[in-house]
Image (cartoon, rainbow, N blue to C red):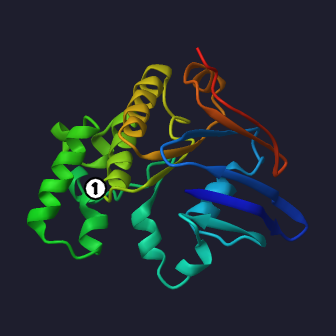
Amino acid sequence: MLKLVGVSKIYGNNAALSNVSFEVKKGEFVFVVGPSGAGKSTLLKLIHKEIEPTSGEIFFNGESLKEYDKKIYLLRRKIGMIFQDFKLFKRRNVFENVSFPLESMGYPFSYIRERVDKTLKEVGIYEKRNSFPHTLSGGEGQRVSIARALVMSPLILLADEPTGNLDWKTSFSLMDLFMEINQMGTTIIMCTHNEEIVRRYNRRIIYLREGKKVYEKFPRIN
C-alpha cells in the first residue's frame, strides 16, 4: 500500500530524514517512535505531501506521489491527517468543522449531513455537533479532529502525536478508538513518544533517531 525507498529530507546542513525505507501493508497499524528531532513529523508530512523529499521516492498503491503533484486534493481524499493541536476552525461548530472537507469537494448538503452525522456517532462526539471548539475538552477536540479526517473515508490515517496533550485516561480512550478504526480496515501510521501506549498496544514499531531508521519491531505473538 505505502512504500518509501531511500527517502531523505535535507534542510541546509541538517538531515531531518536520511535514506529511510520501509513498506506498510493495507490494514496495518504502525507506531513511529523516537526522541524529539528524530524526524517523525517530517516523515508524516512527506507521506501527506505537505513537503517534498530531497531524494528518494514514496509510492502509494504502486504509484509514485510525484504523480499527485498537480492533484494533491486526490491524495488527501485517500490519506487523512490528524494533528496534536487539532487545527479546528474556531468560528465553526463541530458539525461545520467535520463537514468542511466535503463542502470543499462540492458534495450536496443532504449527503454531507448524513455522512458527518454518521462519522460523529462513530467517534462518540455526536452530542457535541453544535458546540464550538472553545467549549470542548482536549479529548473531545481530538475526536472532532479524527472525525474530520475520517469523513472522507481515507485508506490511510496519519496521526502526529494525537495524545501528546491529553491525560492518561483520555489518551487510552482515544487509542481504543484508533484500534476500532484500524479493525474496520483503515491503515494507521501514528507518531508517538508515549512508551506506555506503545507497550500496551502491541503493534509494529519503526524507530527513528537523528533522521535514520534504527530498527523495526513487529508485534508479539501471544
User: What is the residue that sits farthest to the left in this orientation?
Assistant: 110
Give the crowd class for mark 1: few <14, some 14-19, many >=20 residues within 10 Å: many
Camera-side residue of 174 and 90: 174
Q: What residue is shown with label 1?
A: 98
Residue ID at (47%, 81%) = 71
Q: Amino acid at mark 1?
A: Val
Relative to residue 205, is residue 41 depicted above or below? below
Question: What is the x, y in percent for residue 36?
Answer: 75, 42
SS category of the residue bearing label 1 = helix
Q: Taking 146 as reference, is 94 left or right?
A: left
Q: Taking 132 as reference, is 70 left or right?
A: right
Residue ID at (36%, 42%) = 141
- Can residue 131 be seen here? no
- Can residue 10 be seen here? yes
User: Which quadrant: the N terminus?
Assistant: bottom right
Camera-side residue of 127 and 184: 184
Relative to residue 30, is residue 220 depicted above or below? above
Q: Quadrant of residue 205?
A: top right
